[in-house]
Image (cartoon, rainbow, N blue to C red):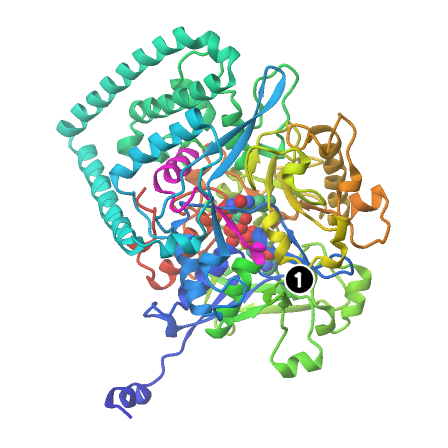
Amino acid sequence: MTAERKRSEDAPQRPKKRIAILGGGVGGITTALALTDPDNPHRDDYEVTVYQMGWRLGGKGASGRNTAPGMHNRIEEHGLHIWFGCYDNAFAMMRKLYRELNRPPDAPLASWTEAFRPHGTSGIETSFGGKWHHWIGNAPVNHYPPGYGGLLPMWTYLRFGLEMYYRNFLGRGVPKHPSPTGDQIIRFPHAEKRRKMVSKGVREGRFWLMAARLVRHLWFLSAPFILAMKLFVWINEFFLEWYWRRHKEKVAEDLVEQERWTLLALMFAIFKGMVWDRVLLDGFKVINGQDFRAWIAKYALDDGGVMINSGFMVGIYDGMFAYEDGDNSKPPGADWPPHAMIEAGECLLACVREALTYRGAPIWKMQAGMGDTIFAPAYQVLRRRGVKVELFHRVDRILASPDGKTVDRVEMTQQAELVERMRSLGGYYPLIDVKGLPCWPSKPIYAQLVDGNVLEREGIDLESYGASWQGDRPKTLVRGDDFDEVVIAISVGGLPYVACDLIGKSGKWKDMIQRMRTTRTLASQVWYRRTAYELGWAPMQEPVVSGYDTGPLNTWADMSHLIERESWDAGARPGREEYPLNVSYYCGVMPDDPPLPMTVCGPKAPYPNQEAENKKVEVLTKVLLTEHLRPLFPEANPESGVFRWEWLVDQRNPRPTDDQRFVSQYFRANVEPTERYVLSVPGSDAYRLPAHDDQEFVNCYLSGDWTDCGMNLGCVESAVMSGLLCANAVCSWPPRSEIIGLDW
Ligand SMILES: Cc1cc2nc3c(=O)[nH]c(=O)nc-3n(C[C@H](O)[C@H](O)[C@H](O)COP(=O)(O)OP(=O)(O)OC[C@H]3O[C@@H](n4cnc5c(N)ncnc54)[C@H](O)[C@@H]3O)c2cc1C
């Protein structure tokens, strides 16, 4: 035994701090991973427990496998999830996670590069001349691996710009080469060199930010800088006005001209706005009080609304679910949905980060469900590190001390108990094996639970705040006995239900709840017996398309690569009679019906009935298929009101009727308080709470995409940044300088 090891064994053991993480979505999981990270020098100081209602981790990103007969372990998501090439913190986390998972090389999704696949093309639909047209964006794929942050070497932008212009306006075609796999990006012959260039890019990026700070503080530098920028803007304005006068007829008649003009006019308005409002020097937050489109409109050239009402603009709002109250409807005669709104600064930051720092490809698609790709590996790694994951624990009330200085108690419902056999085996085992991949099921594994058959028979939804049954057991965590510090990783939509006491005792919490908005979302997944090409979609492979419809399900992604991860009965394949060749995910916002009252505390409305809300999505999907799908799938929808139902897959029935085929697809309404998507409505940014506030509830930390996290938007990257900031607030690790993008 070495002297050092002996000394450390003899040293008195410091008691570990007990951290209770309430909620196991992206934010909570990121915090748990960071606190126990092998690189974290303080990891041994903490004992971490994650409390999660229901049977699975993931929250809004959770997915499950449908194990019912005839459903063939199909993937069922809360909604379409894709990752963007600028998700540096999220990809860095995935790299670490898969390395530690250390799956055998021949296992499915053995590494993160197999778990994600880069994707270069996306599109929007534009209504032009009374018809819908495809507008396909074809961004070049590059060989820079994601997850390292910073700007790319300057010359790359020039190359990107020229390539984009060629592909989108001259070539106008599908890329000559298919997208590389993540693996090809990482193993590209010069990948190491490129990784180094990325770190050089990070240093350069920091240099430019420092330079911007310096210029900002020294008026004798800032005044000439702004003047030079304004001069540049004026020259461009002069040129663009000339261009518009010369080409406006063409723009009205020719779709390609209109696309070209839209992009030019948008880039100009953004640049002018950034100079005029000093965003370049003072940061993105200075314009957060305004709506993005309204801000653009202030600086746009007068083109009769071509640019600001374009499909491109609609696509931005659709992609971010940016509709207050989930209402994307447009009154007759209006150019724009009145409820569309998003903070200008946060939206611009996301667009700029994506445009300037995407790596590999603008979009990355997961190669299985989000639960299988992210949360199953995270669960396995956390368990190996000794983190306790207490599933079936619903938080009911978080209570502060009478003086409002600390969080003292957490009241919960333990929603299920384990049968003796599972207790003796060490606990609930939540994952199932699907073709060699550990996955979460869509329902709890009832056989492991006491009275599981009752739960199943009565259809109790353990992910619902309103669910109750005979197996519920109250449980209270007490500060000092059960936890020392608490991380609230429950989403903001759920806080009025569980954190009333904190809201009542803190003005900042109250303001936050009053100012922030969330929306319901909806999703459906349809398995077709024909490929997208046969359905009538020709422009490109496996697209992600938004804005094609004025109805709620206005974003579509072809996710056919997932079919091989599901276990469809290939015996049904001969003659391609009953086998899926395409799976399409549709997604969008869903209005509150009736509207939510504006109370800050307590249930805002009766608990939603999941089944009834899913039924509404089923009806909307039927309308989509019969009335709105023609622009995308003309062959499936040969004339308005008609749909080829026989093209839908149903392996449950030997001879399915049209109706059986349709109802066997997947329909999902995200209506539970905590499942509501977090919006960034103008002016709300200033009221978001940081990961920790010394003045309030000192043993309480916050994690999730609703906190003030450096990119205040409802997305995975924001939730990861927030989770890291939360871990940093708890134990000063990771250092803030390692959280990529905070300095933007
Ligand atoms: C339909 C849809 C599509 C999306 N698409 C994308 C996309 O393509 N790309 C992207 O980047 N982002 C996307 N997002 C956003 C992304 O899902 C979220 O930003 C992210 O999942 C938020 O994570 P979070 O940890 O902040 O919150 P959540 O995921 O909401 O986590 C909160 C956790 O707390 C748990 N919880 C809540 N209440 C309780 C309670 N009382 N007791 C115990 N546990 C509780 C929840 O079950 C959950 O696990 C999408 C969101 C939706 C809804």
- Where is residue 322 shown, x and y percent of the image? 54, 34
User: Which quadrant holds residue 661?
Assistant: top right
Residue 682 placed where, x, y %?
Answer: 47, 32
Horizontally, is 620 left or right of 404 in the view? right
In this rendering, is residue 183 above or below 304?
Answer: below
Q: Please give the name of the residue rendered at 18% of the width and 33% of the height, measured from the top-left corner.
A: 215
The residue positioned 77% from the left and 67% from the top of the image is 470
Q: Where in the figure is residue 711, as x and y percent of width and height? A: 41, 43
Asked if residue 399 can be seen in this view, the reply is: no
How busy is the neighbourhood of tag 1: few (under 14 within 10 Å), some, or many (20 plus)?
A: many
Quick one: quadrant of the C terminus? Answer: top left
Farthest front residue? Answer: 575
Q: Quadrant of the N terminus?
A: bottom left
Secondary structure category for the residue under label 1: loop
Amino acid type indicated by mark 1: Pro
| Furthest residue toward bottom | 1
The residue positioned 66% from the left and 45% from the top of the image is: 582
Residue 234 is left or right of residue 471, and the answer is left
- Indicate the position of residue 87 as horizontal and vertical percent values: 42, 48
**Which residue bears the numbered disc 1?**
441
Q: Is 360 one of the magenta-colored residues? A: yes
Q: Is residue 388 visible?
A: yes
Total numbered circles: 1
Q: Is mark 1 within 8 Å of ligand 1?
A: no
Above-or-below relation of 478 to 646: below
Rendered position, 452 above or below 668 = below
Verify whether residue 487 appears in magenta: no
Q: Could you say which quadrant of the image residue 43 lies in?
A: bottom left
Write down the region rendered in magenta: 347-371
Q: Residue at x 43, y 18 (%)?
A: 261
Asked whether 400 or 76 is in front, the reply is: 76
